[in-house]
Image (cartoon, rainbow, N blue to C red):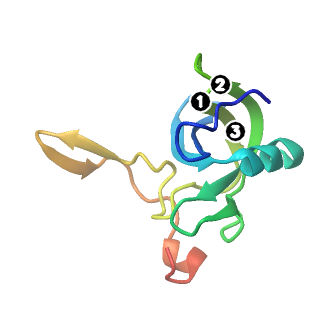
Amino acid sequence: MNVDFSKLDGLVPAIIQEEATGRVLMLGFMNEEALRRTVETGYATFYSRSRRELWLKGETSGHRLVVKRISTDCDQDTLLIQVEALGPGVCHNGYRSCFYRELREGVWKESEARVFDPDSVYGGKA
C-alpha cells in the first residue's frame, strides 16, 4: 500500500464517512498496522494517540464500522474510509456522528439529539 505515513510521526488521518448517506461520522488516525488490520478484517481499526495503541472501533460498544471502500487523497497522506456503521452511533458521547456541534452566531450548539446513552454503553468511561 503506497500511503505516506512519514508526515505525522507514522500516522495518517482517516476520515470516516457513512457510505449510504455521505455523512462524515468521525476522524481517526491510522498507522501502518491499523490500516493493515482494517484491510484484513474489514472493520475500521485506529491508532489511539492518547493511549498509544491500536483500537478496533466498536470493541467496547459493539458499534463497529464495516469498511465498504478505502480511498486516498492526491498526496496519499489522508484516507477516506466509507463504512456501514453498526449500531446507533459512533461518537463516544452518544451521537450518530462525532460532528454533532455547529457554530451558530459564535457559539457551539448541539445540532442533533443523542441516539444512545454513553454511560450505559461504556459504564461511565466515555
Q: How far apart are marks 1 and 2 (CA)?
A: 7 Å
Residue drawn at x 62%, y 32% as measured from the top left: 79
Residue that extends furthest to the top in the rendered view of this protein: 74
Q: Name the residue under label 1.
A: 77
The mark that comes first in sequence, 3 or 1, is 1
Element type where label 1 sits in the image: loop
Depth check, front residue: 74 or 26: 74
Q: How many C-alpha atoms fall within 10 Å of the one at disc 1: few (<14), some, or many (≥20)?
A: some
Residue at x-position 74% and y-position 44%: 35
Check if mark 1's residue and mark 2's residue have beta carbons within 8 Å: yes
Report the residue marked by disc 3. 83
For numbered disc 2, what is the local secondary structure?
A: strand
Q: In this view, does 74 lie above or below 65?
A: above
Of badges 3 and 1, the one in the foreground is: 1
Question: Which three-letter amino acid code belongs to the residue tagged 3?
Answer: Val
The residue under the point 52% across, 51% down is 96
User: Where does the image place residue 99, in percent across and percent down from the top left?
Assistant: 41, 45
Residue 47 appears at what percent x and percent y?
63, 56
The residue beneath circle 2 is 72
Residue 33 drawn above or below residue 75: below
Helix, strand or loop at mark 3: strand
Query: Viewer-proximal residue, 61 or 55?
Result: 55
